[in-house]
Amino acid sequence: MHELSLCRTLVGILETQAGRHHYRRVRRVELRVGPQAMVEPGAMMFSFDVASRGTLAEGAVLEIRLVPTRVVCLDCSHEGEAEKLAEACAVCGSYRLLWEEDAGLRLGEIEVD
């Protein structure tokens, strides 16, 4: 379960930023997740609760925003969005998609005290 490792890294980032910006507590964290991050939202939420225990993020709300990715079909040239890695072209059904961009895993807004 790589979500726990990701959440430990996320908490480390929050603690580093707290040192720089002098906040004491994190109330809310927005995490933007693209398909290539291969994150299971439920596992991520559970892992964040575990990783944040005893830290300034303990009790914070983790909001996961799934961000679709722009794709182009290499067979029919249809341009669209994909929400999953193994998604077929909406027009021709091909799995030969070119991924133009992917948010991966990005820290969005954080609400702090």
Image (cartoon, grey):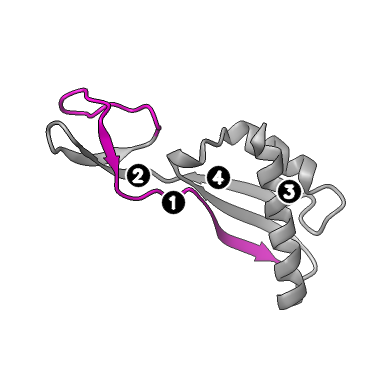
The disc, 4 or 3, on the residue closer to the chain's N-terminal end is: 3
Q: Is residue 40 above or below residue 109?
A: above
Report which residue position mark 3 lands on.
8
Give residue 69's mark. Answer: 2
In the image, which residues are magenta? 84-113
Q: Residues within 10 Å of mark 3 (few under 14, many from 20)?
A: some
- Asked if the residue at tag 1 contacts the one at tag 4, i.e. Cβ–Cβ closer than 8 Å, the answer is no
Q: Is residue 113 visible?
A: no
Q: Residue at x 15, y 31 (%)?
A: 75
Q: Residue at x 80, y 59 (%)?
A: 56
Q: Is residue 8 above or below residue 96?
A: below
Give residue 64's mark. Answer: 4
Quarter holding the C terminus is bottom right
Q: Secondary structure at mark 2?
A: strand
Q: CA distance from mark 4 to mark 3?
A: 16 Å
Q: Residue at x 70, y 52 (%)?
A: 9
- Residue nearest the viewer, comparing 19 with 113: 19
Report which residue position mark 1 lands on.
103
Q: Secondary structure at mark 3?
A: helix
In the rendered image, residue 105, in percent from the top left (x then y), is placed at: 52, 49
Nearer to us: label 4 or label 2: 2
- Asked if the residue at tag 3 contacts the one at tag 1, i.e. Cβ–Cβ closer than 8 Å, the answer is no
Q: Residues within 10 Å of mark 2 (few under 14, many from 20)?
A: many
The quarter of the displayed image where residue 19 is located: bottom right
In the image, taking residue 1 as reference, residue 55 lies left or right, namely right
Q: CA distance from mark 4 to mark 1?
A: 13 Å
- Asked if the residue at tag 2 contacts the one at tag 1, i.e. Cβ–Cβ closer than 8 Å, the answer is yes
Looking at the rendered structure, the kind of residue marked 1 is: Ala
Q: Secondary structure at mark 4?
A: strand
Q: CA distance from mark 4 to mark 2?
A: 16 Å
In the image, taking residue 96 as reference, residue 102 lies left or right, namely right
In the rendered image, residue 64, in percent from the top left (x then y), is placed at: 55, 45
